[in-house]
Amino acid sequence: MRYRLALIGLVLIVAGSLLAWRVQTSGGVEVQEARWRTPEGAVVSGLLYRPPGLEAGRRAPGVLLSHGYINTREMQSPFAIELSRRGFVVLAMDMTGHGGSGGNVGAVGFGGPSALTFLRSQPFVDPQQVGLAGHSMGGGPVLAAAHAQPDGYRAVALVGSAPGLFGPPDEVRPDFPRNLNVVFGGLDEFAGLMWRSPRGTNLPDAAKLKTVFGVDTRVEPGRIYGDPALGTARRLDLPRVTHPWEHFSAGGVTPVVDWMQARLEGEGRPLPAQDQVWFWKEAGTLLALVGAGVLLLGAFEMALSLPGLGRLRRSPEPAAAVRGLGGWLALGLTAVLPALTYLPFMKLGALWLPSALFPQWVQNQLLVWALANTVLAIVIALFLRRGRPVFSLDIPRSLVAAVLSVGAVALALAAVDRLLHVDFRFWVLGFRPLTEARWPIFLAYLPLWTLHCVIVVRSLCALLAVDGESRRLTYLTAAGVMGGGFLALAVLQYATLFSTGLLLTPTEPLNVIVALQFIPLLAFVGMIAVFTWRRTNSYLPGGLICALFLCWYVTSGTANHWSPDYPMTFPPAARDR
């Protein structure tokens, strides 16, 4: 019985990861880790997708893909899967400062020029038939590569991106880049920043787009302007999707596949652009992500059976016979205040600039929000406390149990990453292994996350410790309290976007998108708190697990803005908000 949860988690991880691997290698595609150094010495990483049949000197067209800000190469897998199964060699890169790449955001052309050189140098790639595609800030490395090697590519797709934003202003002209496909969501939250258009649906009338297309009238979506033979072809595609939806929807993937098939020549597998399978990989990594959560809880259950750690096991002691009005009010405030304070505290956190010790600007902002809400949790506990909870406290054993629990998930992730080149993710939520370079960053931030998580989990457990409340209701209450506020925030923001074309807070697109991740993350934090408290009568194991879990998630998936070798930069999407 004590092994059941861990076994279920492992089965889900294996099944989901194998499904994801099978989809991204469909048709005999080989996926492998790629690493190279820029001339300046920065290490850049990527995933190289190699179609079958390229032995004995045969070459295929290639496509370089780049993700956006605070994302990683895995976010471009829908494009990589669909292009590689059609015979294209695909290099999905990590921008500098992101994922497994060194340096910081924006360093050495975001890593784009060296990535293009690496792709074109592969013996199975036709260097005269290479395309470039980037989502959001991914336009930075793509356009930097086009600047550095004007004859090294034949076509470009900018998805939710624009020229002149992450590079020099003179990019906004009709002869650069060559053969451009602009794919921009009609509901894209960054329309104002990218194209100076009030809404995505207004993009065809935007002056900046007209300049890029070399016209003075409205740009018609779907129409090809210019001459592909001269490199002046232009096409706008305007699917009704949001910014983070652009690279996980047929509306975003189809036009890019179609554009590359039309603009690049070479042997391949000419499938219709609408023939897509990438979503099954998403189903697989989602299954693995759920399995990782189950494994974490199962590993904690197993840890309690180890010699010495069994002393942690205690029956939970209720703090009050009934919750009462004060208890419900405290739960309500615990749910609402984190979401209500999120945007203003993130803006305040922007004042905490990156440094050698704390190099991740977005993580700095998140910690300002988290620590401010730690104070609010203490205030709620002091003024709305019902009864006096009696918790067990064993710091050494709690720490060991927490490390073993999170370590089990980290080992499982390292294995599937190494063997299958997949991770645990769904859409904007993704776990990837900590690289060697990011371990010191993780350890620097961990004490601050520990302070936040231990206090918040203690406050939550005190509110949940009510005599006679069912186990199911306790779990639902904890998940709802922790994630419900952000769910309400997302509903308000996106209901407004879908009805008006603008977010409820249109000047905060980046932080609104970041907030989407907190719905499942915080709901799971609530479940961890309940699971561990019910078995130990202590908030400490759950608080420590959540600290390790959140610090790992943010550190591995967030961009480095400071590095010892390159000047610090800030993306306009964050700097100008």
Image (cartoon, rainbow, N blue to C red):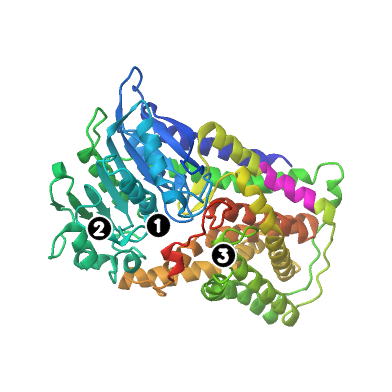
Callout 3 secondary element: helix
In the rendered image, residue 402 lying in the magenta stretch gets the answer yes
Residue 356 appears in which quarter of the rendering? bottom right
Which numbered disc covers residue 238? 2
Callout 2 secondary element: loop
Q: Which residue is mark 1?
A: 244
In the rendered image, residue 50 lying in the magenta stretch gets the answer no
Q: Residue at 31% across / 73% down in the picture? A: 500
User: Mark 3 packing: few (<14 Cα in 10 Å), some, or many (20+)?
Assistant: many
Q: Residue at 77% across / 59% down in the picture? A: 540
Residue 393, given in percent of the width and then of the height, sits at: 84, 60
Q: Which residue is mark 3?
A: 483
**Residues in magenta, as a range:** 399-408
Q: CA distance from mark 1 to mark 3?
A: 20 Å
N-terminal of the two: label 1 or label 3? 1
Quarter in which the C terminus is drawn: bottom left
N-terminal of the two: label 3 or label 2? 2
Most foreground residue, 178 or 368? 178
Amino acid type, callout 2: Leu
Please, which residue is most extreme toward the top here?
56
Residue 300, given in percent of the width and then of the height, sits at: 73, 47
**Marks 1,3: beta carbons within 8 A:** no
Most foreground residue, 313 or 105? 105
Q: Nearer the viewer, mark 1 or mark 3?
A: 1
| Magenta-colored segment: predominant secondary structure | helix
Amino acid type, callout 3: Gly
